[in-house]
Amino acid sequence: MTDAMDEQDTSAPLRLPPSRMLSLVAMHADRLVSEGLAREGARKWHYAALMALHQAGSMSQAALSRLTGVYRSDLVSVINELAERGFVERAPDAADRRRNVVTITPRGREHLRRLYTLVTELQDEVFAPLTGQEREQLTGLLIRLMEHHSPHGPSWSSSRPPTS
Amino acid sequence: MTDAMDEQDTSAPLRLPPSRMLSLVAMHADRLVSEGLAREGARKWHYAALMALHQAGSMSQAALSRLTGVYRSDLVSVINELAERGFVERAPDAADRRRNVVTITPRGREHLRRLYTLVTELQDEVFAPLTGQEREQLTGLLIRLMEHHSPHGPSWSSSRPPTS
DNA sequence: ACAATTTGTTGGTGCCACTAACGTTCGTGG
DNA sequence: CCACGAACGTTAGTGGCACCAACAAATTGT
């Protein structure tokens, strides 16, 4: 009933604050996904950008930035790389000449498909120890935490497969 | 039934893979904690190292590295900083002259106390939207994920307050 | 017409996880 | 007993990521 401090216990496991657990698990998941995507020559943001363009349609880089949460400065190189490989087209917007309209190409959708199945597999690997119900519990809790801390950040929900 | 791909839906929220949610929440939590600790002139690893030393007693830097998961290269500067401020003592080990025995000092324990209460407050802030039960659910799921992916990594469990 | 804002872009900062290499010291097997 | 491999502390460096500042060009609001 004092402020009960632990005695030393050389053999006991270390007590971690929950936020540290989050970091560790997130790091591991990130790692797996990044390595997987690297095998396909892609990075996390390639996937994020393609998925956003596929789901929401063509849009300016700034809009894409707001939607994905990727900084518009960092988005430049991502679009460059995607454009080099023909997964995306960057064209000046006639209606507003400040903007570039970024559009996903058929090859881009094809690529996205590969990435999607890959990412899905990796998710299964990451969350393997959890049952389907538990995974839903987890994502539910995570969504509530996200909403709490960035109510106007990038929008989200659980993932569903991209259509051709 | 097919591989059901989403149609475009400009207004719908983006579908995020769970691993991305983990990253976002972890980033936010990390951010809050780091900023809080910075206010006390400390960093995450100061806290981690002090807590480990407090709970498990004096040990070599390599052992501390294994226990906390912090790379022994990165641990050097952490110990330097903690030693400068008198929170920790680094003495050559007479029995094994390769090693340094790192020991937490009374001032160190005092400092750890401040950090502990601070971190605890910040955890409350991070997990504010969740009830006590839900927090336990979450940490339970996280622990299982950690065990699955690094069964022999740094040991852990939920956190409890340090004793003076 | 003028101020404020948006957009794409460049360049730069700082943190963190991670690797490589090193001299030193210890343990072990031949 | 000594040669070799391994562990230790340390330094230096890499690469990715989040983030910021500033800019010119273009648009919007007033």
Image (cartoon, coloured by chain):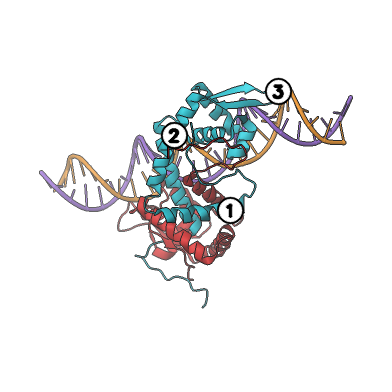
Chain colours: A cyan, B red, C purple, D orange
User: In 3D space, how far apart are the residues under numbered discs 3 and 2 (Cα atoms)?
Assistant: 32 Å
User: In 3D space, how far apart are the residues under numbered discs 1 and 3 (Cα atoms)?
Assistant: 39 Å
User: In 3D space, how far apart are the residues under numbered discs 2 and 1 (Cα atoms)?
Assistant: 32 Å
Q: Secondary structure at mark 3?
A: loop
For the residue pair B96 and B55, the one nearer the viewer reads as: B55
Q: Secondary structure at mark 1?
A: helix
Chain at numbered mark 3: A
Q: Secondary structure at mark 2?
A: helix
What is the x, y in percent for residue A20?
A: 48, 55
What amino acid type is highlighted by mark number 1? Leu
Residue A75 badge:
none
What amino acid type is highlighted by mark number 2? Leu
For the residue pair A106 and B81, the one nearer the viewer reads as: A106
- Is the residue marked by circle 2 packed among few (<14), some (14-19), or many (20+) residues within 10 Å? many
Residue A115 badge:
2
Left or right of B120 on screen, residue B52: left
Discs 1/3, front: 3
Q: Picture quarter containing residue B129?
A: bottom right
Q: Which residue in the protein does label 3 denote?
A: A97
Discs 2/1, front: 2
Residue sticking out furthest to the front: B1
What amino acid type is highlighted by mark number 3? Arg
